[in-house]
Image: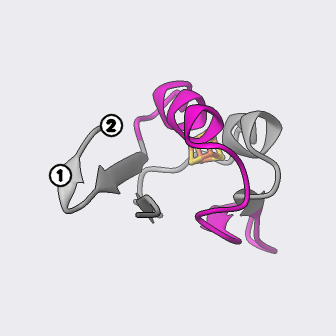
């Protein structure tokens, strides 16, 4: 089952780390805030690395409803 991903737009500082680690999953919108393009766009490992690498912990990742990051 695919991961589900939530971005806290109030907390995101637009660093772009997430789109560096998982470019098919994350992008920055016109306001410079991260968005999810496709939760299954990159491997789960990349999504998890991207979430763990967020400097403001703005990314939450869930598998089967359980928060894993
Ligand atoms: S890594 Fe975190 S702070 Fe940086 S753009 Fe992504 S969600 Fe925003």
Residue 4 position in % (x across, y down) = 41, 64
Give the label, 1 or 2, closer to the camera: 1
Mark 2 element type: loop
| Number of numbered discs overlaid on the protein picture | 2
Looking at this view, is 23 or 34 the one in front?
Answer: 23
Label 1 to label 2, Cα distance in Å?
9 Å
Q: Magenta region: which residues?
A: 28-57
Residue at 63%, 62% (x, y): give it: 40
Residue 14 in the image, given as x and y percentages of width and height: 68, 48
Q: Residues within 10 Å of mark 1 (few under 14, many from 20)?
A: few
> According to the image, label 1 marks what residue?
66
Residue lying furthest front in this view?
A: 1
Neighbours of disc 2 within 10 Å: few (<14), some (14-19), many (20+): some
Q: Magenta stretch containing residue 29, yes or no?
A: yes
Q: Of the numbered discs in the image, which one, if any, rests on residue 69?
A: 2
Residue at (71, 34) in percent of width and height: 17
Q: Quadrant of residue 64?
A: bottom left
- Please state if 68 lies on the left or on the right of 19 as rendered: left
Q: Quadrant of ligand 1?
A: top right
Q: Nearer the viewer, residue 40 or 35?
A: 40
- Confirm whether the magenta stretch covers residue 34: yes
Horizontal and vertical percent position of residue 41: 72, 60
């Amino acid at each position: 089952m695919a991961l589900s991903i939530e971005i806290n737009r109030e907390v995101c500082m637009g660093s772009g780390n997430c789109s560096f680690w998982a470019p098919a999953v994350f992008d920055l919108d016109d306001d410079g805030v991260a968005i999810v393009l496709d939760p299954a766009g990159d491997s789960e490992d990349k999504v998890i690395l991207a979430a763990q690498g967020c400097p403001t912990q703005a990314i939450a990742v869930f598998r089967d409803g359980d928060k894993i990051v």
